[in-house]
Image (cartoon, helix red, strand yellow):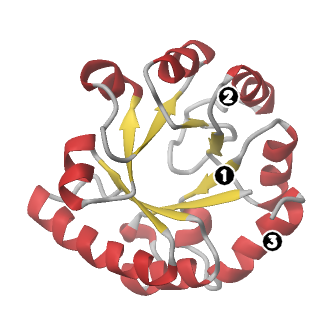
């Protein structure tokens, strides 16, 4: 099962670079640098540091905030909204990871060239208070209809990851689950064991 860490430095238990290193060391497959409040220069500086850490462990680095930014950085992938994919198309030289929130968006994203979908929020999550959970039934429908791998996001922990795997998800994305973890390696190992997939 793919395990993707989505950063949130404001709720990180230690300096972000230290936490990212522990997450990569623990075996996460990719890190998404999300930090939406940063200006362009600050984001790019942090992105270069994060990318260096990721590459030292063979972990994929995915830039958040648009394909143009990801291409400028030389990232492994670009995390895109469905609206951005629809408006600008997929990046030419990297993986397009597209966030979708419905079966229709998922189908259209596949048609427009997404390499991977992120569907959620599957469970209720503190990251989006008050937003209803889509649920595992909806995740199952998206996975069954998608021609590309689907990652589940929103409230993912070991039990939820097992249900996501049963619904057909190729992996999970975690924000607070890894940002707030004193021992990220244990979290990653627990998810892999629970999902039954290495």
Residue at 62 percent of width and 65 percent of height:
177
The crowd level at tag 3 (other Cα within 10 Å; few <14, some 14-19, many 20+) is some
Answer left or right for 44 relative to 95: left
> Which residue corresponds to the image point at 32% horizontal and 45% vertical from the top-left?
93
**Foreground: disc 2 or disc 1:** 1
Q: How many marks?
A: 3
Give the spatial CA distance, label 2 vs label 1.
15 Å
Judge whether 44 appears above or below 92 on screen.
below
Residue, disc 1: 172
Name the element at disc 3: helix
- Name which quarter of the figure residue 185 lies in: bottom right
The residue indicated by pointer 3 is: 190
Give the x, y percent position of residue 10.
Answer: 37, 68
Q: Is residue 66 visible?
A: no
Marks 2 and 1, the one that precedes in the sequence: 2
User: Residue 186 in the image: x percent, y percent?
Assistant: 73, 81
Q: Which mark is residue 73?
A: none
Rate crowding at label 2 as few (under 14), some (14 to 19) or many (20 or more) other CA atoms within 10 Å.
some
* C-beta proximity under 8 Å, tags 1 and 3: no
Specify the quadrant that holds the N terminus: bottom right
Picture quarter with the C terminus: bottom right
Instruction: Report the Cα–Cα distance between label 1 and label 3.
Output: 13 Å
Q: What residue is shown at x 65% (from left), y 38% (from top)?
A: 149
Q: Would you say residue 64 is visible in this rendering?
A: yes
Helix, strand or loop at label 2? It is loop
CB under 8 Å between discs 2 and 1: no
Where is residue 137, by image quadrant?
top right
Helix, strand or loop status at disc 1: strand
Per the image, the residue denoted by label 2 is: 134
Give the mark nearest the N terminus, 1 or 3: 1
- Residue farthest to the front, as pictured: 93
């Amino acid at each position: 099962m793919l395990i993707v860490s989505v950063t949130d430095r404001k709720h990180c238990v230690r300096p972000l670079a230290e936490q990212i290193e522990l997450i990569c060391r623990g075996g996460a497959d990719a890190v998404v640098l999300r930090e939406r409040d940063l200006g362009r220069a600050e984001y790019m500086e942090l992105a270069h540091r994060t990318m260096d850490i990721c590459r030292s462990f063979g972990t994929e680095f995915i830039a958040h905030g648009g394909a143009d930014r990801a291409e400028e950085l030389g990232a492994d992938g670009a995390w895109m909204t469905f609206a951005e994919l629809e408006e600008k198309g997929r990046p030419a030289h990297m993986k397009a990871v597209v966030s979708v929130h419905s079966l229709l968006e998922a189908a259209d994203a596949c048609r427009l060239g997404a390499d991977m979908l992120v569907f959620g929020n599957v469970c209720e999550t503190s990251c989006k208070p008050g937003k209803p959970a889509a649920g595992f039934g909806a995740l199952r429908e998206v996975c069954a209809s998608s021609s590309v791998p689907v990652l589940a996001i929103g409230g993912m922990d070991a039990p939820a990851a097992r249900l996501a795997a049963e619904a057909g998800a190729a992996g999970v994305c975690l924000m607070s689950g890894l940002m707030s973890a004193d021992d990220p390696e244990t979290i990653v190992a627990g998810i892999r064991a629970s999902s039954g997939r290495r």
